[in-house]
Image (cartoon, rainbow, N blue to C red):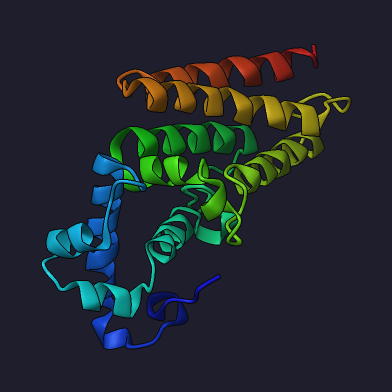
Amino acid sequence: MTRTRYQAGIDEPSSSTASGILQAAIEEFDECGFAEASVGQIANRAGTSKSLVTYYFPTKSSLATSILALAHPNGVFMGREREASDPLDAILQAAEHIATCVAHHQIARVAIKLHHRRDIRQQGIPARYSGWLARTADYLEEAKRNGQVPVSTDVAVHSRLLVAGIAGLIDMATTTGDYLSLVDDSILLTRDRLTLIRGAKE
């Protein structure tokens, strides 16, 4: 994998330049797609020169991997710190947060599209939902220990079904370009699935 100056932390005072270039790349990839975007177009959008873009990011692929790294903080797609103390509420909040990011933030949509490219995926980027899946499993294990779900709950299976359900909704929205109901549908699907898991306890 090509290491960029931005990733390596070189020239920190100019990090706003690198951030501006990344934002321009996100916009260009979102509007034109990775294959059609060019370093020259990204430079124009960033209001800088092509040579400065390649100074920070030697290749278009290095821009893509940097965008994917930004979209996976701590290895979790659009991850953020847990807010809810209740683990089941944390699962619901994560589903809502991820759906909101995909519906309203270019970086999330671009990251999903970039993940479909085998040449980009092979550069050490985490699998699209692996961190989110692990986090969901951790929350379900915690709920199991707390007695909120049955002891017999198959955490691995239910974690996969929870994440796969949201992933399917995201894929449908990304394919159709219709994000209008994505957040509401994601919340409804997650609530229904959690109700089903809890219901097995009774």
Q: Is residue 94 above or below residue 188?
A: below
State which quarter of the image contains the N terminus. bottom right
Q: Is residue 72 above or below residue 40?
A: above
Residue under the image location 24 percent in, 49 percent down: 27
From the viewer's side, name the closer residue of 76 and 109.
109
Residue 36: give x, y in percent of width and height: 30, 46
From the viewer's side, name the closer residue of 198 and 11.
11
How many marks on residues? 0
**Residue 119 in the figure: left or right of residue 48:** right
Q: Quadrant of residue 105?
A: top left
Residue under the image location 39 percent in, 28 percent down: 174
**Residue 115 in the figure: left or right of residue 11:** right
**Residue 12 in the figure: left or right of residue 147:** left
Residue 15: give x, y in percent of width and height: 28, 78
Residue 101: give x, y in percent of width and height: 37, 40
State which quarter of the image contains the C terminus. top right
Q: Quadrant of residue 51?
A: bottom left
Residue under the image location 70 percent in, 30 percent down: 160
Residue under the image location 31 percent in, 80 percent down: 55
Q: Is residue 72 above or below residue 99?
A: below
Q: Quadrant of residue 18?
A: bottom left
From the viewer's side, name the closer residue of 37 and 202.
37
Residue 109: give x, y in percent of width and height: 37, 40
**Residue 155 in the figure: left or right of residue 161:** right
